[in-house]
Image: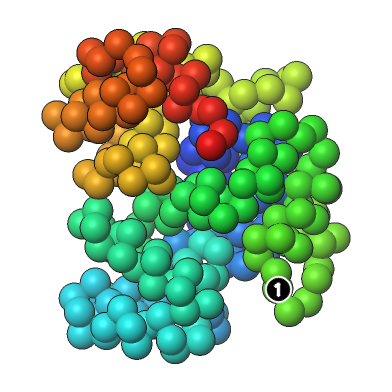
């Protein structure tokens, strides 16, 4: 069973609204069932074919070049286009994780949105319209052969019901370990909010460590690099000013 709450928390903590995150999740559900280890056409419940595919790519038995050009959709977004699929594989390889790693794939989606679909990301971070979010993700990001927006919207609504206990009555940010508004963070702390920092800095090419929610020495160095670039106090502490710059659209 996909962990919808984890993905929802990741995307809302990265700046998306409730409606924006669900619009994206409705599309991921339509593409892969929100499963990171999912190869196109694999309908067996144990996903043996998908797991074997991931193992072969991770081990190098199946080269990234061959994998990228096999025209088989892969992962959360069912990446199929060769360049995007290869970029995902290299993104995971650089971080030392499997191509089936859910957190890395979510971070890669954020990276693609930031770098290639900026206007869509800006919309997902401001909208209160779930149907429109579903429609725009479908038409601009996924671009499936069949434009089944209504079905994707129904899936988003179903996911909303399943995660209802993690969403405040006012439809705002999720509660629990999301710590939103963000906590002040520094070395040796951990949590979903640290994972957000890792993902944002990874998407900007400043962090290439583990995506594990732990504030390590490597993340500390990446934060200081980011602070230097933004003219902030370089102390490795992610306080209000650093958070504000991290969440700015570029």
Q: How many labels were placed on the picture?
A: 1
Nearer to us in this view, 46 or 50: 50
Q: Is residue 85 above or below residue 202?
A: below
Q: Residue at x 76, y 47 (%)?
A: 133
Residue 190 can be seen in this image: no
Can residue 119 be seen at all in this image of the molecule? yes
Q: Is residue 91 above or below residue 191?
A: below
Residue toward you, 99 or 201 = 201
Asked which colour scheme the image uses, the reply is rainbow
Q: Is residue 86 left or right of residue 57?
A: right
Query: In the rendered image, which quarter is residue 183 located in?
Result: top left
152, above or below 44, in the image: above
The picture places residue 88, in percent across and down from the top left corner, at: 40, 64
In the picture provided, is 141 more to the left or to the right than 193? right
Residue 146: x and y in percent read 78, 76
Residue at (32% x, 22% y) in the render = 227
Compared across the picture, whether 193 is left or right of 93 comes to: right
Q: Nearer the viewer, residue 171 or 215?
A: 215
Q: Residue at x 68, y 48 (%)?
A: 120
Where residue 209 appears, x then y in whole percent? 22, 44
Q: Is residue 150 above or below residue 123?
A: below
Q: Secondary structure at mark 1?
A: loop
**Badge 1: few (under 14), some or many (20 or more) residues near its Cα, within 10 Å?**
few
Q: Residue at x 62, y 24 (%)?
A: 173
Task: Look at mark 1 in the image and give the residue it sits on.
Answer: 144
- Give the left or right position of residue 80, taking residue 205 as reference: right
The one nearer the camera, 138 or 248, is: 248
Residue 63 percent coordinates (x, y)? 27, 83
């Amino acid at each position: 069973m996909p962990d919808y709450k984890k993905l929802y928390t990741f995307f809302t903590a990265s700046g998306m609204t409730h409606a924006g995150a669900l619009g994206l999740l409705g599309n991921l559900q339509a593409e892969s069932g929100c499963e990171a280890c999912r190869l196109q056409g694999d309908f067996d419940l144990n996903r043996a074919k998908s797991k074997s595919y991931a193992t072969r790519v991770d081990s190098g038995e199946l080269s990234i070049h061959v994998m990228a050009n096999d025209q088989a959709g892969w992962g959360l977004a069912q990446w199929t286009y060769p360049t995007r699929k290869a970029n995902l594989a290299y993104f995971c390889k650089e971080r030392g994780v499997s191509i089936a790693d859910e957190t890395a794939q979510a971070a890669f989606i954020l990276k693609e949105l930031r770098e290639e679909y900026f206007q869509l990301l800006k919309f997902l971070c401001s909208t209160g319209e779930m149907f429109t979010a579903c429609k725009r993700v479908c038409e601009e990001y996924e671009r499936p052969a069949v434009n089944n927006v209504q079905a994707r919207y129904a899936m988003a609504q179903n996911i909303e019901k399943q995660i209802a206990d993690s969403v405040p009555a006012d439809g705002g940010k999720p509660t629990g370990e999301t710590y939103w508004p963000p906590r002040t963070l520094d070395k040796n702390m951990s949590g979903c909010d640290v994972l957000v920092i890792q993902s944002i800095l990874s998407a900007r090419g400043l962090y290439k460590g583990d995506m594990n929610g732990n504030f390590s020495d490597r993340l500390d160095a990446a934060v200081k690099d980011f602070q230097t670039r933004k003219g902030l106090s370089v102390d490795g502490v992610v306080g209000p000013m650093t958070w504000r710059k991290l969440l700015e659209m570029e």
